[in-house]
Image (spheres, coloured by chain):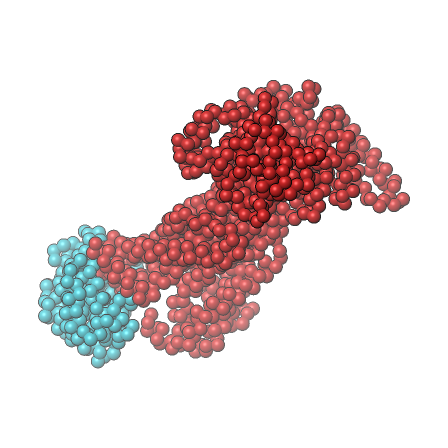
Chain colours: A cyan, B red
Amino acid sequence: MQAVGLTKQVLSGDQPLTILHDVTFAVEAGESLAIVGASGSGKSTLLGLLAGLDVPSSGSVLLHGADLFALDEDGRARLRGELAGFVFQSFQLLPALNALENVMLPLELAGVKEARQRAEASLEQVGLSARAHHLPKHLSGGEQQRVALARAFVTQPKILFADEPTGNLDAATGSQVIELMLELNRAQGTTLILVTHDEALARRCGKQLRLAAGKVE
Amino acid sequence: MNILRLSLNLLRRDWRAGEWRVLLLALVLAVGSLATVGLFADRVRQALQQQAQSLIGADLRITSTRPFSPAYRKAAEARGLQVVQSRTFPSMVSKGEQVSLSEIQAVEAGYPLRGKIEIDDGSVHVAQAIPARGTVWADERLLRRLDVQAGDEVGIGARRFVVAAIVVKDIDQSIGFSSFAPRVQMNDADLVSTGLLQQGSRLSYRLMIAGDAVQVKLLRTELEPGLSGNEKMEDVRDARPEIRTALERAEHFLGLAALTAAILAGAAMALAARRFVLRHLDGCAVMRCLGAQQGQVLWLFLYQFILLGVLAVLLGGLLGYATQAVLVESIAAMRNASLPQPSVLPLLKAAASGFALLLGFAFLPLLQLRRVSPLRVLRREMGSPEVSGWLIYGLAVAVLALLFLWHAGSLKLGLAVLGGLLAGLLVFGWLAWLLLHGLARNSFYFQSQWRHAFNNLARHGRSAAVQVVALSLGGMALLVLTLVRADLLEAWQGKLPPDTPNRFVVNIQSDQVQPVRDFFLRQSLPAPELQPMVRGRLVAINERAISGDSYPDPRARGLVEREFNLSYMEQMPVWNELVSGKWWGSCDTLLAKPADCGSGCQTASRVLETSASLCRGGQNGAGELSVEEGIAKTLGIHLGDTLTYDVAGSSFTAKVSSLRKVQWDSMRVNFFVIATPELLQDFPASYLSSFYLPQDKVRAGDELSRAFPNILLIDTGAVIAQVRGIMDQIAQTVSAVFLFTLLTGLAVLYAALLATQDERSHEAAILRTLGADSRYLRSLHLSEFAVLGGLSGLFAAAGAVLLGWVLARFVLDIPYRSDISIWFIGCGGGMAVVMLAGWLATRQLVLRPPLRILAAD
């Protein structure tokens, strides 16, 4: 993945406000990158741009050689479905679906036939087979994030975007989740892009990108 | 297919989580109420139609004074229709020395094609055949006049017949002048043997046709152009203007009931759809993140909505069918009326309306989901993508408008209700917003929780205004259907009070006027107001000669070709209404003086008389005419035009000084054209009147006929009973449907409460964290609900009064007086209901530990 001159400006009142300024870097396949910085430094904005969830004011993102912003929103969605997995701070499980169904969702959207078997296998990998039929509200925070991991990895993504994956978890549970994520990452050879302000977690990634006031330090 | 399967899965899962319940409930209630009203109305309409058909004894009737061409019968039979002929003529019926003029009706086997004749031949029952040869059936009036009993013999022409039965309930009668005499029914095969079929017999022929409605219509189109001048074709709508009016009013009322349910359902669905969308924004963003394209997201939800629609339509249809069946069974008059089974059409109509509501109120909010930004997964504060408000409301209004026009079945009613609704929506929404902000601005006068409540409501000014509007809409519909409906029905039914005239008396000669008045006095009956009638032909308008050929419209041609019944009078009849111009009686009021005028007012009344005569003097020589507005329109007569009439060879010309509206269903004597007395009083006139003959004085009618043989006495009591019966049925129908509307109204309230519950629960959790106790929270919530409910109730009352006035004035054509209590009931009721429902919905909120709520958020 390659980011070239990524800049994001928004209007704050009448004044343009630069959230990201000319961010350029590259991550090789299978590498892991931690984006670190203080609150408001532009970490989440950068992650959103890298994943194609938002469009930059200028600059581009090349994913497996394809220019993300040359595609329309639906094209980016298709690419996300094929290549990317996500883990969020607030888990983002669909409350109406049980654990298994949440994991099946990306497969079903992609039209995969054996969605159920693969989702069950994925839940097995995160050690939650026994809770497959529980709704998110009946799972603990750690369990919810493990379901989110199972959902992220079930499509065997080429690249995993993680936004503060331990932000809502206590230290012990958080480190369990991190171990699991890194292990899955290694096993599947996935590229990992992680936003965190946990320095210890950042150090475990191959590369670190430090942001301050929207610029790379 | 894959998306469809996924939709099914999501629907199943969402269903389990309770997400769809409100929408489904709203839609089921919508379809259910529409189906109930539709099916119910359909059955009543069919029953009314049948009842009305029984009045002419057929679906279509051709009358003539000459025998029909056999081609008519052949044409009808070729279309598979039933045909029966009757011949009617006046003749004397005798028993011993006594004779009575009667209307002899000779009928063929199969008569009547529609409706039933009830006879008493020892026991009262529905006649299964026509009179056997050699026998006749007679009505009670003949029996009274000739002192005949069943089984006696009477003479008609050269033959004698046995009176085999008494006709208890007859059909096929018209208000026309022919039914003045008692009726005797005989077998057509006996007619020749009476020797009464001679040259010059005043025979009236009737060809009655019934069968498949489409074929009847086709036959009518086929035969009508070829009818000769003395042949007249009519179906129930032509035959009975008063029944037609009642039928149309029935449809208006039922249409109104259906509309109200549709509005309420729409409001409930809009609220439910909004909540559904808000609760699915996150899920959609996640799906977009996981690779779902916009089209996929749209179809994912569209399929669910369609499936939901199908389910709701099925359930609603079932509910509607069951409800109307229960309604019919629970209303005695309906149960006994053995209503026909409803057709499938109202169900289809309700289903289509359900889908239209779903489209109008849920489709555009749904489009929002498609456009959710996936970035929302990272930034929850992003809110929901906005679809143009104009577009959303525009579509909803368009769908409602179409439904209105469709269900009202009348452009006038549909537009009246829709116009009232739209104006109400805008004005109420704006007023609510203004009031809520006004309250917040002045909240420092109030206690803390009130202040907090006002500020809360003002902060959500727009959504609170939407809630107030939705609730007031529900309330308005409920008030219209309860209080206003009762007022309207009472006023409407009041148009036919119990002492509505049930007899017409015509052909009274000038020298009989006083003797007839004396007769009534002797019988202790109030003297009828005898009105003069002069027959004249309209020959010119504005000095330009006219004839039948001047008008393409056959009705107008018919009016011009025959003689008008003209009358003259000083005062306008009270049951007429001046539409434009001025009644000449305006200076006659000067003549009115108190009956017990003492000596003190003698001088005053002399002065008045002088002024009155001066007033008259001003009009000397120039007579005036007052024309009924309908006929004026048909003949192209305007205020200020001069009309020339030919009366018995001499003519007069006068100016049209006013147009009147006439209540044709008032059962009173009405005239198309009324003149000032000086114009007509010198022409030969006969007199007529209508009066109420109580049941216990029926014999007085017979004595009147005996004392003045030339006078025609016409019994209109049966028609009045029929019209009144129809009105009663309608009144009961609307009352029954009210229950359903109440349910839909409660669904609106439920949806409105659910729509704000998430936010309310979040706020409660934060307030609890900050130290608010449950008492404070409860009184905060109740204060908010009290304001919402009170405002909604106030607006509901205002809307109901306005709508009632519009309906009364422009649709039902009656004066409307609203009761002041509607305002108190509206406000108090709104407050009580919203507070109670709100308390039920939020009482758990104040007790739940705040952390659980915040964690769930």
Question: Does the rendering let one see residue B855?
Answer: yes
Q: Nearer the viewer, residue B154 or A19?
A: B154
Question: Does the rendering let one see residue B582?
Answer: no
Q: Nearer the viewer, residue A101 or B716?
A: B716
**Residue B796 placed where, x, y %?**
53, 57
Q: Residue furthest right?
A: B599
**Residue A213 placed where, x, y %?**
26, 65
Task: Judge from the rendering whether residue A57 lies leftward or rightward of residue B725; answer left or right.
Answer: left
Q: Nearer the viewer, residue B171 or B97?
A: B97
Which quadrant of the figure has residue A118? Answer: bottom left
In the figure, B565 relative to B135: above or below? above
Residue found 54% across the figure and 25% down from its top: B66
Residue found 49% across the figure and 48% down from its top: B44
Residue found 72% across the figure and 28% down from its top: B685
Residue found 53% across the figure and 63% down from its top: B830
**Residue B35 placed where, x, y %?**
42, 52
Q: Nearer the viewer, residue B738 or B336?
A: B336
Q: Quadrant of the N terminus of chain A?
A: bottom left
Q: Quadrant of the C terminus of chain A?
A: bottom left
Task: Judge from the rendering whether residue A112 lies leftward or rightward of residue B302; answer left or right.
Answer: left
Task: Judge from the rendering whether residue B853 lies leftward or rightward of residue B185; answer left or right.
Answer: left
- What is the total number of numbered labels drawn onto the structure image? 0
**Residue B226 placed where, x, y %?**
47, 24
